[in-house]
Structures are given as structure tokens and as C-alpha cells.
Amino acid sequence: MTPAGRWQDRVNAVRWEAVREDLDAYGCALTGPLLTAGEAAGIAALYPDGARFRATVDMSRYRFGEGEYRYFREPFPAAVTVLKEALYPRLVPIARDWWTRLGREAPWPDRLEDWLEMCQAAGQTKPTPILLRYGTGGWNALHRDLYGELVFPLQVVINLSAPGGDHTGGEFLLYEQRPRAQSRGTATLIPQGHGLVFTTRDRPVKSRNGWSAAPVRHGVSVVRSGQRFTLGLVFHDAA
């Protein structure tokens, strides 16, 4: 079997009903393994190759945290392309259901290619797959990955490093403002090669009047030791 077939099979093997349930309950959900340890290390090893990337951001310079991330330029690594194309149709039904609950029109077509063409037509022409690097003391402030008018409400992060081996700390953080209630935080330690699906901007939560949109931000807790690489898959392009 080709590597592309293996990546597709891993996405197919995800317990998607369980992912939907966890997204509804917590705003984030682990997928299980999407990359082998070797594949994850291979993507992390691309970080020094500046020709692979269209832009580099020093988080401390902009007070985003402590660390650095780089946006891939096309052509992407094969795993990035295949995983985005395989994950998108699994996430679209969840996104549409969420928007229906909130009384919003869901604009997302069945195919990722068609959705990215819509982004292009709206002036969002810059690719958004991200490779992030944190060293000891690194962290990421709570934020949202919004790059223009068109937004896909779910995204995926894959830990390329081994918790407890390559790094300690560095939990993924999700912070949700709940309607007429105290805000809630969720911390997840993502195993190497596993994905975490999470809310991009807001999500539906039950309220006294039906459904309300709960704003959500995400970040990364302090890396206490070692080095942590992650791959971010955002399903809308940037202006």
C-alpha cells in the first residue's frame, strides 16, 4: 500500500462518532494515530529548510508566546496534502450540523478543493498548514486562527514529538466562554502522531433559549523541558 493509502486508512479508522461526541461535550477530540513516529519525525525535520515555507513568525516578537512557527508553501509534504483531503469530508458534516443548530447558513461544499477555490475568490490566497516549534519554556497564548472572512469551524493539530520523551509539559489548551456561566478550560496532552480536532472560533452549546455560540480560543501550556513540534492543519486559506 502507498503512504497516501495508509494515511487515508488511518483517517477512516478514526471513531468519528466518538469524535463528534467529544466535540459536542468539550470542543476538542483526539483522533488516534494519523502519523507513525517516523513520519512525524520526518515532518519535524523539515523545519530548518527555509525553502519549504512562505513565512516564519517569532511568537515573542508579537507577544504571542515563546516559540516559532512557519507556514508551508506549496507543494506541501505528501502527508499534509493527503491528511487535509481525507479529514475535510469527515469534518464537514459536523460543521454543517453545528451551523444548523446556531441558525446559520453553512457555506462549505463537499470537497476541500471547492472550498479552497471559494477562499481564493474571496482574496484568501495564502496556504495555512503550519509547522510549530517550541523549546524549553515555550508556550502559545490563547488565540484563534482566523485569516479572513471565510472560516472553517474545525481544525486539526498533530503532535510530531513524544510527550515524556522529547518534551514534558506543552499541553494543548482550549478556553471556552460559556453563556451566562464561568469560562471553562480543557487541557489535552496529545500523543506523538495523534491528531486533535478542535473548535476554530465558536461552537454551539445548549442554553435556556436553545443553542448559543460559545467563543473559543486555544493555546499551548509551557514546555517544561525538551522540544515540541506540531503540525497545524487549518481548512481555510489566509488573506
Image (cartoon, rainbow, N blue to C red):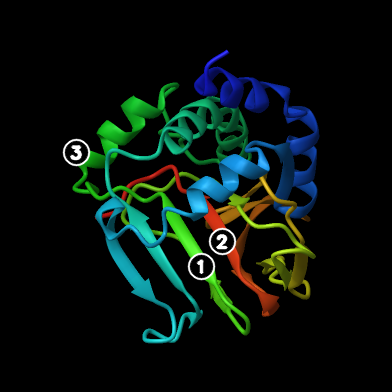
Q: Which residue is mark 1?
A: 133
- Local crowd size for mark 2, using a 10 Å CA cut-off: few (<14), some (14–19), many (≥20): many
Residue 121's label in the rendered image is: 3
For residue 200, side relative to residue 165 (left or right) = left
x and y percentages locating residue 30 in the rendered image: 74, 45
**Local secondary structure at mark 3:** helix
Residue flagged by tag 2: what amino acid is it?
Phe
Secondary structure beneath label 2: strand
Residue at numbered disc 2: 229
Pointer 1 or 2: first along the chain:
1
Q: In the image, residue 172 lies at what x, y percent?
A: 68, 64
Vertical side of 205 occupied by 220: above or below: below
Mark toward the viewer: 1 or 3: 1
Q: Quadrant of the C terminus?
A: bottom left
Say which amino acid is labelled 3. Answer: Ala
Dot placed on the residue nearer the N-terminal end, 3 or 2: 3
